[in-house]
Image: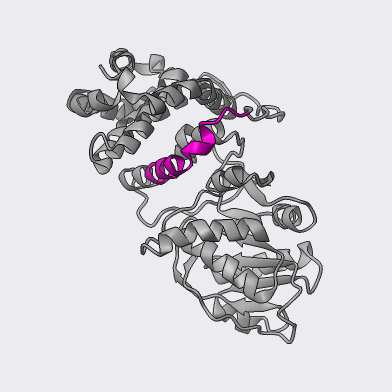
Amino acid sequence: MATTNPIPYITSNSEQTGNSLLVLLAALPPEQVEDVIAKLTSAFPPGETLIAADPLVAEAHPGLKIIANPVVKASWMLTAADFVNSHQLAHKNGARAILMLGPEAGSLGLSALRELGHAVTANSTDLAVARYDLPPRAGLVNSAILYPVSRALFASQTRFPLAIDLGLSLRMAERLSGAGQRFTSKNQADMPVWPVNEAAVAGFSITEIDAGTRALPHPVEPDLNTVLPGLTGSLFADIETKAAFWQRARQAPQRRNSAPNVQAEAVDATADIAPMVQAFRLAYTNLQEIWSLVLPPNSLLGLKRLSLTDGAAFRIPESLWARIVYDFLLAHRLRTINRGHLLGALIPLYLAWVASHINVVATGVDPERHIETVATAFETEKPYILARWRWPDRFNP
């Protein structure tokens, strides 16, 4: 969805001011474009919505308020360039709020679109974030790292910190544009920006919208060796720049009130996790030198015990996983080793967590219940990262 800064034009005779909501569409197949536009016209009053889309879309709907927004480089997530561009378009066209819709937005329901837009136009919300209903084994990088870390450090219970469907107030858009400009000025326009973290630091209001099921786009190169280091490295860098904020004591987020899903029937997941367990064990043999530079003795001992575990008994304690991620966060800040090598060394540990999560769910535990348990462990272990961040040498063996 990344874009340059196009010179927009209005394809109807409407004035370019007074639009309540600017809707930015990612590049979509023609049938999805028609579906999204139909839902938007049903969800919002006529004449109050301005749509920014591919120039061909603008030409095909001369009766609607549409501006041309050429997509130069498609992306599977919102990027720094998207936030810069959205704020510029909103400012130029007099919009008071923004609805950003990512790739595969045609799979979003009408109610999700309405509520995301309504939250930032009719309510006093600065940031409306979509919460998706995903299959049990989807979005696990988010469940294992992005969500629990963001929740523990920024006191936000937003389930998808990098949701690709967002509602923004004008001041939220301005803040995210400022964050995006820091990347675009360094020719890093495709870098992600962390809206939830920015809103937390600014003291802006956040609302989470239940978006139901959604087809999520896949990275151009859906390789864990690329995706995991890219996302965790970006999150770790953002956390470092906001350290003064999250190190201050603040109230933990309120627990979710939603009831867990019906427990699944217990199954044997041994065959499913075998390749991940094997990858972890191979890494345990080959990466001891790197891990020993990052992890304290207690964590290394926990990994040794895990390497001797098999089958359904393969479980990584939530507290151990939280401390491992925090230790990698600290090593990223201190540049203990090359950051590329560091984040690469996290991959087999993440696979161990996935194998453990699959084993837990295979016993009939609701997946969301387990993920909430993991997030709670990160909150509980927050004093650990605070102490390590302030006095890292105290923990060195």
Q: Main secondary structure of the magenta part?
A: helix
| Residue 148 percent location from the top left of the image | 52, 32
Picture quadrant where residue 262 is located = top right
- State whether residue 335 is above or below residue 177: above
Looking at this view, is 284 or 361 the one in front?
A: 284
Relative height, residue 312 to residue 150 (above, below): above
308 versus 14 height, above or below: above
Q: Quadrant of residue 251?
A: top right
Residue 245 located within the stretch drawn in magenta: yes
Q: Residue at x 54, y 25 (%)?
A: 379
Quadrant position of the C terminus in the picture: top left
Apparent side of residue 99 relative to residue 340 in the rendered image (left or right) = right
Residue at the image position 37 percent from the left and 25 percent from the top = 324
Instruction: Indicate the position of residue 272 as horizontal and vertical percent values.
Output: 38, 29
User: Which of these two is toward me, 32 or 101?
Assistant: 101
- Asked if residue 78 can be seen in this view, the reply is no
Percent position (x, y) of residue 162? 52, 47
